Each structure stands twice: as structure tokens, then as C-alpha cells.
Image: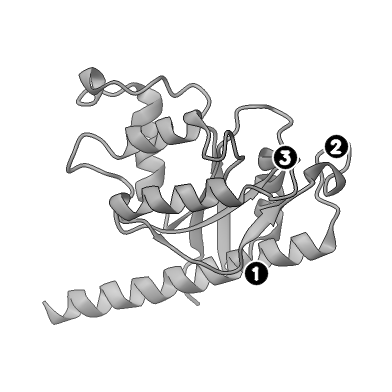
Amino acid sequence: MDQPIRILGIAGSLRRKSYNRAALKAAQQLAPEDAVLDIFDIEGIPPFSEDDERQPPATVVEFKKRIREADAILFVTPEYNYSIPGVLKNAIDWASRPYGDSAWSGKPAAIMGASSGRFGTARAQYHLRQVFVFLNVLAINQPEVMIGNAASEFDADGNLTNDTTKKLIRQLLVNLTGWTRDLQKIHAGRAEKK
């Protein structure tokens, strides 16, 4: 049997009881049998400065290491002012620098998000996809997991209770795992031809 696909989960919210952190924990439990989902907490990553990019802080060094070790990435983002949160963009920027040393390039990825509003982070997810273009992150498109009215989807302890949403998250992770394996086969085929 193939090695499990290692997915690194990143929540774009620092709030301890955020719906996005809860959704990421649910995803960890819903990962398919041939995948393992680990979580990296971006809290503590300082604001990005080009002055420090060649000698990044230890949290950034560890973050880039974990991204590189992962086979795929799962972003779980809230929506702030119609876009992604500054803390998530900051973490993404750190891991892409210095120029020519991006940890993101070629990584398969999936996106999901939860919000108290009815659109479930749709605009934030589309903005994140725009960022992926420059980063060369290879995101899957389906299913779109946009958890709207999140207060009705989770219980008081942060457990996801909606079975339809659980199925969508599970399918997203199944698709991400399959996409990652497909890309690994393509890379292996190219390596053999060299």
C-alpha cells in the first residue's frame, strides 16, 4: 500500500473558539484512511518584514519546514472585509520568501471556510485562489466547502454537527488526496524520463 498522504492544515483565524479552527479539527477526524492531517498554528508568526526574510524567526523556519514535509495543504479561512485575514496572508508571505525560496511552489491544496454570515467565506476563498496563482499552489476546485451560518453547524464545544457539511469536508479531503497522488505520479514519471 502507498504511504499515507500527509496534509498540513492551516486555520486562518487566531481566535481559540473560531469556527474555522473547529472546522479544521473536524477535517482532521474526517480525513480518509490513506491520509493524515496535521495542524500548524500560525499564532506567533510575527509581521513580515523584508529586513528579516534572510534570517527568519524560528516559528517561520518551522512553518516552512512543515509545509515542505507535507504532501498537500488544507487552508481553512474566515472572511474579513470580503477577503482573507491579515494573519493568514502574513503567514503565506513569510513562507514564500525570500524570493526563489518559496515553500509553496507546486503544493496541492484545498480550501474551506466557515463564517457566521450566509456566504460562508466565498469571497475570501476566491481571493486566496488569486494568491495561489503567483505561489504556484495547485488547488482543487470541487467540492466548494463554504460553511455559512456557522453557529448552527457547531455545538457549544465546537463539534461539527451537520452531516451534510461533514460529507462535503470528507469529499474535499478525498479529492485532495487523489489529486495529490495524481501529481506525485506525474512528477515520478518525469523523473524517470530524465
Q: Are marks 3 and 1 in contact (CB under 8 Å)?
A: no
The earlier-in-sequence mark between 3 and 1 is 3
Identify the amino acid type marked 1: Gln
Front-most of residues 108 and 85: 85
Q: Residue at x 44, y 54 (%)?
A: 129
Q: Amino acid at mark 3?
A: Tyr
Q: Residue 157 shows which numbered tag?
A: 2
Q: Quadrant of residue 13?
A: top right
Q: CA distance from mark 3 to mark 1?
A: 19 Å
Secondary element under disc 2, as helix, strand or loop, is: loop
Question: x%, y% of residue 33?
Answer: 63, 68
Q: Residue at x 76, y 40 (%)?
A: 116
Label 1 Cα neighbours within 10 Å, binned few <14 / some 14-19 / many ≥20: some
Q: Which mark is residue 171?
A: 1
Q: Amino acid at mark 2?
A: Asp
Against 15, residue 183 (above or below) is below
Tell me where residue 50 appears, x and y as whole percent. Answer: 23, 23
Q: Is residue 42 or residue 148 the one in the foreground? A: 148
Q: In the structure shown, which secondary structural element does the residue marked by tag 1 occupy?
A: helix
The residue wearing badge 3 is 19
User: Residue, x 34% and y 35% (percent of image)?
Assistant: 93
- Contact, CB < 8 Å: mark 1 with mark 2? no
Residue farthest toward the left in the current orientation of the protein: 194
Relative placement, left or right, of 179 versus 50 is: right
* Image location (x, y in percent) of residue 55: 23, 22
For mark 3, does the 10 Å Cα neighbourhood hold few (<14), some (14 to 19), or many (20 or more) residues? many
Disc 3 and disc 2: Cα gap in Å? 11 Å
Percent position of residue 103, x then y:
31, 45
